[in-house]
Image (cartoon, rainbow, N blue to C red):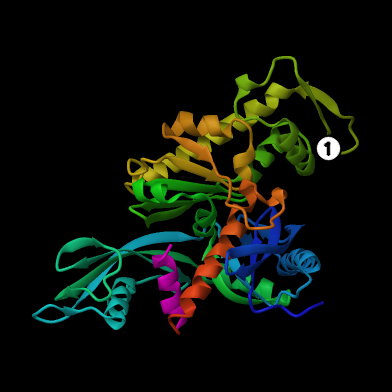
Amino acid sequence: MAKQQGNVLTAIDVGSAKTCALMAEVTDGGLRYRGHGVAQSRGSRKGVIVELEKAVAAIQKAVEQAEDVAGAAVEHAIVGIGGSHVRGINSHGGITLGTRPREIGRDEIKQAVERARAIPLPADREVLHLLPQEFILDDQAGVHDPLGMMAARLEVRVHLVTAAASATQNVITAVNRAGVHVDDTVFEPLAAADSVLRADERELGVCLADIGAGSTELVVFLQGAVAYTGVIPVGGDHFTSDLSMGMCTPLVEAEKIKKVYGNAIVTLIPEGNEVEVPSVGDRASRLLPQRLVAEILEPRARELFEMMRDALRQCGMFDACLAGIVLSGGGSRLPGIFDVAESVLRRPVRLSWPTPLAKMPATLAEPEYATVLGMVNYGQRARAARGFQGDRWGSRLKAMLVG
């Protein structure tokens, strides 16, 4: 196996359903695909690792597959963080520069941001991202980059993405035990946004809903900046569990039925269609109406989007999403879920199709790979920023500012 090359970025997405490792090469023309590997996740539930050794084995399998395709070793990676333990907070802070306006430098920007960051957090929580929304110079709001401008007072509004320290550390530990050093972590829907959202959507106001296996993670962009992040504790596994109980069939079989015959709209399935449903134990399989599948899935889909609507209303972001809702993640592939989303949310809805990397296999250009594709884009921006700023805090801030 060849050594990892310095211009190769690796992203690892440890999901509840699958673990994916993606290697991309940084070239003058942008990112180019080198290899990827996918393994069924073990030891993860609802975005949290519950069995460390099983999670390590899944990561190792995905990494080894990627290494075989790329012909290069994976030694460092950026890793995705998600799950219901992630929460977002908006904050505000600033500094006075003096009685008369003077030029704003990087140190002043950093001091203002640190003031905004200085809010009390529970001992078990840590800041995953610090995302500037806007700077305010002497009551003049809407400034994106105050460097070199003149002011007597500099203020900043920021969005903090916080996570349970133990849950984050368990993901890092699992990747480390798989033989890979974690260079950085990123909240998964922020990464997905890099590969699926358009600049005009971010400016007008848009919500990205990343429907994973264990949960649905939300990020709202307004005027180009992150205005809200949150997690809905419903994902694709809940649909599968409903089918398993409603049709009295094993979870593995329920997942197959969902993928082959599932639909979130009952009336889209012709009457008379039947599905062979395996029974539990030694009982014989049964033929059941296919509409029964949709009758079980539709209420869960409506619940998901009602919870999303209520969460966005509670934080005052629902009416701000003028560009609508973008669905991402494997759960967004369920037929009919698009129609349910539009019916409940009464907003424009579209399915995400991630921007492909050069030389990338067509099989990766699907919503379920939006996160890992966005992670290598995030890693590229952070690496570029690191060339201009030495410290890790500065590079992360700059990476998000140029997004």
Amino acid type at mark 1: Val
Question: Is residue 396 toward the left or the right of residue 355 in the image?
Answer: left
Check the picture and name the quadrant holding the C terminus.
bottom left
Name the residue at 41% across, 46% down: 206
Q: Which residue is outermost to the top?
A: 272
Q: For residue 265, what is the image quadrant?
A: top right
In percent of the image, x 39 and y 52: which residue is there? 221
Residue 227 is a magenta residue = no
Q: From the viewer's side, name the closer residue of 388 and 343.
A: 388
The outermost residue toward the front is: 28
Which of the pair 143/325 is nearer the observer? 143
Q: What range of the chain is rendered magenta?
A: 391-403
Residue identifier under label 1: 280
Residue 65 as seen in the image, left or right of residue 332: right
Tell me if I can see residue 81 in this picture.
no
Establish if 245 lies above or below 116: above
Would you place residue 389 above or below residue 349 in this image?
A: below
Q: Is mark 1 on a helix, strand or loop?
A: loop
Q: Residue drawn at (73%, 66%), measured in percent from left and top? A: 59
- The N terminus - image quarter: bottom right
Q: In terms of secondary structure, what is the magenta stretch mainly? A: helix
Q: Position of residue 179 (x, y in %)?
A: 73, 77
* Residue 240 can be seen, yes or no: yes
Q: In the image, residue 297 lies at what x, y percent?
A: 62, 32
Residue 376, image quadrant: bottom right
Residue 389 placement, left or right of 132: right
Q: Position of residue 144 (x, y in %)?
A: 30, 64
Dot 1 alpha-carbon crowd within 10 angstroms: few under 14, some 14 to 19, many 20 or more: some
